[in-house]
């Protein structure tokens, strides 16, 4: 049997980008501890809708922890108090009856608030578009294992590729830096043979775009690594630094 | 040149400058500590004063010392530039922030620790470097008999002192030097200065606890095999041993002189 609890939630409400916004407090009563955090918000929103009030806007999509759409800065931490999960995978049993929960949007100049808790993360898309791809000519399907890749390298590339681009790294970082995201995207291709042709061009272009978007600068606190729902490691940032400095100091002739 | 300019104006390039200057200052700490250990020798400060003359007059070391002053300034200025940039990256702050849940205290307070260190460096240089270079220290003469090895120490008036000399006359080695050792002994009679030094060395310990390995991470020198060695050196040598060694000096002088 699931337990039920009564909670108070302090939620950031903001009409649009221009609005100053502020906190509003709501009651979340009779919440089952088996509910996910987003389901709790659904219950609160149902109540608000019935009363004719504007429901709380928040991002969500798959609710399976793989799409990277849900965000929420809960009680001072991105995706709430647990590690290696997204907010949709956070359950109400992680909270206590009678608790007050503060919910804020990701705070970053590069992630403007669209409404309430939903932020605009297209800055990440623009960084990806700057170089987070491989140019391949379409043609016949290549044979499997035609290009051999050592297993540890393939694993490492796969780990980097698990980044879902949710932005928790930016939200967690005291400097609002996006380096964990950018480094994961650079790494996944720098490690594999298919990514070699555009390797140095990519590192430079993606870092440039990251700076253009106005993200902060890394001070190696490691907060991003702790809060990342996919456990992307700080090693990726070291690799990005290596890729970028190699590109800038030694590989200028390979860039365009 | 355009390429270098764009590199060092990027967020990564500015980090690189922080790492380069920071590590250079780390290497200086080793030299400074080893040299200053002479403060513990019981020779009336002879070895210490000869060493300080050497450090201020040997040309290669003079060049390095200018690099050092530049590094301190560049490190502090870039820290300020980066901090302002990072604050701009988050214009609206969080109402609830649990920084301690995901990052070490040192790593989140490098700016405060660095500010303590900058205040310390200014005080330190005003007390010793400035006074030494402007003849605001006492002067001393050491006469060592080459047969018995016995040394007599005598303070000499400023009017008798021209420049550092070291010569042998009638079986007696005579050294005349600026008595920085006496200045050190005098300065550390002030308990507040001793406290400032001990606090500053604690700050340095915490600063390097995060700073040393952080520089390697910024260079991209991250390797499964070697990073544990870097972390070990960062913690035990740079965050513990070196600050303890430095902090011992004012304490030793205060309690023994």
Image (cartoon, grey):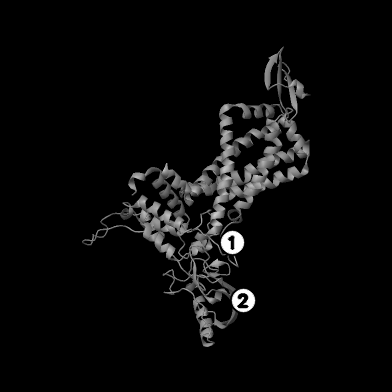
In the picture, the disc for residue B38 is none
Q: Which residue is mark 2?
A: A99
Q: How far apart, in angstroms, are the residues tagged by discs 2 and 1?
A: 20 Å
Q: Residues within 10 Å of mark 1 (few under 14, many from 20)?
A: some
Does B202 sit above or below residue A93? above
Q: Residues within 10 Å of mark 2 (few under 14, many from 20)?
A: few
| Residue for point 74% across, 43% down | B193
Q: Is residue A17 left or right of residue B235?
A: left
Using the image as rendered, state which of residue A178 and residue B232 is in the foreground. Answer: A178
Q: Residue furthest left?
A: A140
Chain for numbered disc 1: B
Is any atom of residue A158 visible in this view? Answer: no
Using the image as rendered, state which of residue A88 and residue B117 is in the foreground. Answer: B117
Q: Which residue is mark 1?
A: B99
Chain for numbered disc 2: A
Dot 2 and dot 1 within a common chain: no
Does A63 sit above or below residue B182? below
- Give residue B4's quadrant in the image: top left
Where disc 2 sits, the SS reads: loop
Percent x, y for residue B101? 58, 62
Q: Is residue B88 left or right of residue A237?
A: right
- Give residue B5's quadrant in the image: top left
Q: Is residue B129 left or right of residue A162?
A: right
Percent x, y for residue A139? 21, 61
Is any atom of residue B62 visible in this view? Answer: yes
| Residue for point 51% across, 57% down | A216
| Residue for point 58% across, 50% down | B80
Where disc 1 sits, the SS reads: helix
Using the image as rendered, state which of residue B191 and residue A111 is in the foreground. Answer: A111
């Amino acid at each position: 049997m699931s337990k039920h609890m009564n909670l108070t939630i302090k939620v950031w409400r903001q009409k649009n980008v221009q609005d100053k916004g502020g906190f509003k407090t709501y009651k979340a009563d009779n919440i089952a501890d088996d509910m996910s955090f987003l389901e709790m918000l659904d219950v609160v929103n149902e109540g608000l809708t019935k009363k004719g009030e504007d429901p709380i806007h928040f991002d969500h999509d798959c609710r399976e922890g793989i799409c990277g759409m849900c965000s929420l800065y809960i009680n001072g931490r991105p995706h709430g108090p647990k590690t290696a999960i997204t907010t949709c995978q956070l359950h109400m049993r992680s909270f206590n009856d009678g608790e007050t929960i503060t919910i804020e949007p990701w705070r970053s100049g590069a992630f403007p608030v669209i409404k309430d808790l939903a932020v605009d993360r297209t800055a990440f898309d623009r960084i990806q578009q700057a170089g987070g791809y491989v140019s391949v000519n379409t043609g016949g399907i290549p044979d499997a294992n035609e290009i051999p890749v050592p297993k540890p390298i393939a694993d490492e590339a796969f780990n980097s590729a698990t980044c879902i681009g949710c932005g928790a790294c930016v939200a967690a970082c005291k400097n609002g830096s996006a380096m964990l995201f950018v480094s994961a995207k650079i790494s996944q291709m720098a490690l594999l043979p298919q990514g070699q042709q555009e390797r140095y061009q990519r590192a430079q272009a993606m870092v440039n775009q990251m700076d253009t978007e106005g993200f902060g600068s890394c001070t190696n606190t490691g907060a991003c690594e702790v809060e990342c729902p996919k456990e992307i490691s700080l090693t990726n940032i070291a690799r990005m630094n290596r890729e970028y400095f190699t590109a800038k100091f030694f590989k200028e002739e390979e860039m365009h | 040149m355009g390429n270098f300019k764009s590199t060092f104006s990027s967020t990564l390039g500015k980090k690189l400058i922080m790492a380069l200057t920071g590590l250079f200052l780390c290497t200086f700490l080793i030299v400074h500590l080893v040299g200053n250990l002479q403060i513990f020798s019981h020779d009336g400060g002879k070895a210490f004063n000869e060493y300080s003359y050497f450090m201020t007059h040997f040309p290669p070391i003079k060049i390095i010392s200018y690099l050092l002053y530049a590094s301190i300034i560049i490190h502090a200025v870039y820290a300020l530039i980066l901090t302002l940039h990072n604050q701009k990256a988050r214009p609206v702050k969080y109402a609830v922030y649990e920084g301690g849940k995901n990052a070490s205290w040192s790593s989140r307070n490098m700016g405060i620790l660095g500010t303590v260190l900058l205040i310390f460096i200014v005080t330190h240089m005003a007390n010793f470097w400035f006074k030494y270079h402007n003849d605001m220290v006492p002067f001393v003469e050491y006469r060592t008999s080459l047969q018995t090895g016995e040394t007599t120490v005598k303070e000499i008036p400023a009017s008798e002192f021209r420049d550092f000399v070291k010569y042998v006359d009638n079986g007696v080695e005579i050294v005349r030097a600026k008595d920085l050792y006496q200045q050190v002994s005098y300065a550390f009679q002030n308990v507040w200065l001793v406290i400032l030094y001990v606090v500053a060395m604690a700050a340095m310990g915490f600063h390097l606890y995060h700073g040393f390995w952080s520089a390697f991470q910024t260079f991209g020198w991250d390797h499964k095999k070697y990073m544990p060695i870097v972390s070990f050196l960062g913690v035990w040598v740079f965050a513990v041993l070196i600050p303890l060694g430095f902090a011992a000096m004012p304490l030793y002088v205060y309690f023994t002189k």
